[in-house]
Amino acid sequence: MPGLNTAALPDLIFTVLFFFMIVTHMRDVEPLVRYDVPLGTELQKVAHKASVVYIYVGRTAKDSDQFAIQLNNRLATVDDIRAYIEEERSRMAPEDQALLTVSLKADRDVPMRLIADIKEALRQSYALKINYSATKRPQ
Amino acid sequence: MFKSRKQRSLPELNTTSTADISFMLLIFFLVTSSMDSDEGLARQLPTPEDPTEEQELVVKKRNVLLLALDAADRLTCNGDSTDAAQLAGRVADFVANAAADPELPELSERDVHLLGRCKVSDRHVIFLRVDPAASYNAYFEMQNAILAGYNQLRDALAQSRFGHAYAQCNAEQRDAVAMVYPQRISEEIGNRQLE
């Protein structure tokens, strides 16, 4: 039996590699809080990556009952949200500013009190488009 | 005996390990990137109100669907306890009021671009009353069910009038369908008015 010509094997792997590069994106935020987003069915993709601002709400430690907010690599409180939105907004191009969307990635057990405070802070900074991050529920 | 051999060629590179190099690159990308979900429930918050204004909306009882979520994550719809699965159906029935039931919202006759004259459901309001101690998951499932109800109606209308689902409609068609079934939701978490 002649040996298989394995010269084309890396090309196969490169194909898989390019697939992953296109499908995922570089994680530029280290998660400091643990969260499990809820499951839903009526989900829409967040349009325009450039106009998205992320807010993470989750547990500070495994099995902890304390929930914390993370804005861009550091833990913060509800009062920091307005400054954060302004900062992110000033970094965007004008056409992206009009489409500014806040992607709220919150753990399932977060009490609504905290979510309500966050939403009020967003409202005050006129960041009115909000997207409650979730994963698709298997039907 | 002489060896009439060509000049001895250089030994070929063993290429079997080039696949390993590409595995390394692949694993590097898998580790540094994240398959974070970038989908979710898209909602719009209302503009911040002037806190000195007190708005009292006078709404007829038939036009109101009152959804309450208490601290123990129990969902009630107009007083009857329900769950997220049934809620989508109830919202759809409430908003559409296909049979012009006097207990369900009033429909108005309007001229809608692309659809002509039709009954639009623009008088209904869904009131959400959420206890601050309720969990985000219960709130999310409630929002999901409400949106499912609206999407059910919008898909049915888009399918019957345009031949494809609401998501496949172009912007004009979507505006037309959204005018027939607008999302009118008013939210109150604790004593704070939102939406």
Image (cartoon, coloured by chain):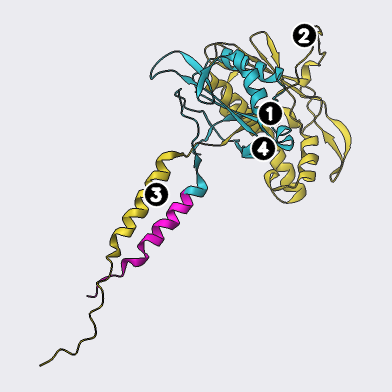
What range of the chain is rendered magenta? A1-20
In this rendering, the label closer to the viewer, 4 or 3: 3
Q: Point out residue B117 in the picture as x, y percentages from the top left corner.
A: 88, 40
Q: Which chain is yellow?
A: B
Residue that carries the numbered disc 1 in the rendered image: A90
Q: Which chain is cyan?
A: A
Residues at badges 3 and 2 in contact (C-beta under 8 Å)? no
Q: How far is disc 1 from disc 2 in space, using C-alphas? A: 27 Å
> Which numbered disc covers residue B152?
4
CA–CA distance in space, label 2 to label 4: 36 Å
Callout 3 amino acid: Leu
From the viewer's side, name the closer residue of A40 and B16.
B16
* Magenta residues, dominant SS class: helix
Give the quarter of the image for residue B20.
bottom left
* Badge nearest the viewer, 1 or 2: 1
Query: Which residue has dot 3 on it?
Result: B26
**Secondary-structure class at tag 1:** helix
Residue under numbered circle 2: B51
Q: Chain of mark 3?
A: B
- Measured in 3D between alpha carbons, the distance from the residue under mark 1 to the one under mark 3, in whole angstroms, is 36 Å
User: Residue B185 location in percent, x, y?
Assistant: 72, 23
The x and y percentages for residue A39 are: 52, 31
Cα gap from disc 1 to disc 4, whole angstroms: 39 Å
As drawn, the residue found furthest toward the bottom would be: B1
| Mark 1, other Cα within 10 Å: few <14 / some 14–19 / many ≥20 | few
Q: Tag 3, which secondary structure? A: helix
- In the displayed structure image, the side of residue A64 where residue B41 appears, left or right: right
**Residue, x 74% and y 35% (percent of image)?**
A94
